[in-house]
Amino acid sequence: MRTLFMKFNFLSLILLLVCSLFSCKDDKDETGVNEAFIGGEIVNPNSNYIVFKKADVPLDTVFLNSENRFSYKLSNFEPGFFGFFDGREYQNILVEPNDNLLLRLNTIDFDESLVFTGKGARENNFLMELYLKNEKDDENILGLGQKDAEEFDSIFRESRDLKLKKLEKLKAKYNTSPFFNEIAEKSINYEYYAHKELYPLANYKISELDAFNSLPEDFYDYRENIDYNDEDLKDYSPYVSFLRFHFNNIALQKHFSHSKDSEYNKLDLHYNLDKLELIDKYVSNEDIKNNLLKFVISQFITFSKNTEHYDAILESFKNKSTNLEDIKVSTQFINSYKRLKPGNRLPQITLLDNKDKEINLNELIKKPTVVYFWSKKNKNHLIYSHKRVKELNVKYPEFNFIAINVDSISYKEQVRILKRNEVRINNEYRFKSPKQSKLTLSVKPIQKVFILNKNGEIVNAKANMFGIVFEQELLGVLNQ
């Protein structure tokens, strides 16, 4: 960590300048106007801009200068979490009045390299350290799932207690703000609670129903004190993740109580309806409730192939969400997926080839076909999907593999992006009308893949070329 801070000598000079410009103070400005400054350097940037967000709503797009540095000023804001997006990855920053934060990160190791200096840095570095430690704890949970509930709990409780001790030392040494102290303590506790919520699903030795039945009576005592409407934490991942896991869990318990099921099926219609009902019952904050409801229906319609269940889940969602845009988008996606069920042909979609000639997607399907998508905004997927198709093309020459770019770009730019990322250029097309075409084909997430048989009929509209069953699906098409 010290070596990373040594790299900030040049930024320290900037910080002094910033402080003089904005009259750095330890207390709130006497005028009552909240101000804060965020600046820094992005090494190996994914784009030439940074998008700052609040509650997932874009505030500003800030462009990098020739040295990949940026600066941004906040005024008249409520303290809390602000997000920044570099074109590929997203992270939170805690900002309080009169903070002067400078950050440095290398996109090759995005989270691991992110370090702050300046006023507000101690708090954000502590939260970042928590974030990375939580990731390691998450990786360990499946390996600990076979332990009994008491031993499982003791391991994560010990981790929680160590984090709380570090927080107490930070508070005592630097007199951190009450706002930060409360947020950090809640974050630590909610991460611990999230692991406990996951225990019945991580225990692969017995069914989920048996796992619930074997829990100590006090295992979920903390549930009595859950704040389902924490305005300060509504945009913070440990809290949001906890709520998702929690509602998954209590919905499953409810589902077991009125069904004959004993094992977890995340795509069961009645289980998901139970989840929507419980979110509606316990959460009153509109932002938190709407985001949780949207996550449930998005997961269901993205992964469920049972189109007969879509209307029921949509009707329940519409009765509970107050976000009209979420309702509109969910309705559009469900209508699209209904048209894309197995046995149907693809809708009429116009593509552009390497000569800007228009061609209908269905005209390209003359044998078993895989259609995949990519975007310049997702560099990792762009590279890995093309490399994966290169492998598959050798193993399954009977298939035609069609790549479609979803951005509004020229063929010249399309080729430039592919060459820059050192991937093979083969069978590449782009949408003539990207926005409408993405909606018609429900290209969300970008990783989704279509598998079509030789007659151009949909076999799977939600395939995953990196999944363990993908090649089995391809073989199934060839054996038809």
Image: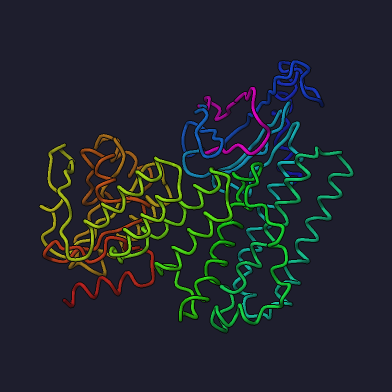
Q: Quadrant of residue 409?
A: top left
Q: Nearer the viewer, residue 379 or 151?
A: 151
Position of 283 with respect to 3 (left or right) is: left
Q: In this view, does 104 lie to the left or right of 452?
A: right
Query: Which residue lies at the image location 63% right of the left edge and 48% below the top edge?
Result: 229
Q: Quadrant of residue 179?
A: top right
Q: Is residue 122 above or below residue 466?
A: above
Task: Indicate the position of residue 294 as horizontal and vertical percent values.
Answer: 45, 51
**Residue shown at the point (42%, 68%) measured from the top left:** 270
Q: Where is residue 19 in the image (x, y as percent from the top left)?
A: 74, 21
How does the figure colour the protein chain or chains? Answer: rainbow
In front here: 300 or 373? 300
Count of marks overlaid on the render: 0
Q: In this rendering, is residue 321 above or below 300?
A: above
Residue 136 in magenta? no
SS majority, magenta: strand
**Between 188 and 49, the one nearer to me in the picture:** 188
Is residue 187 rendered to the left or right of residue 468? right
Q: Quadrant of residue 133?
A: bottom right
- Give the magenta-colored segment's residue range: 63-85
Please give left or right for residue 392 compared with residue 358 in the image: right
| Residue, far right | 172
Q: Where does residue 155 sit, x and y in percent of width and height?
A: 74, 71
Q: In which quarter of the image is the C terminus?
A: bottom left
Residue at 64% across, 27% down = 77
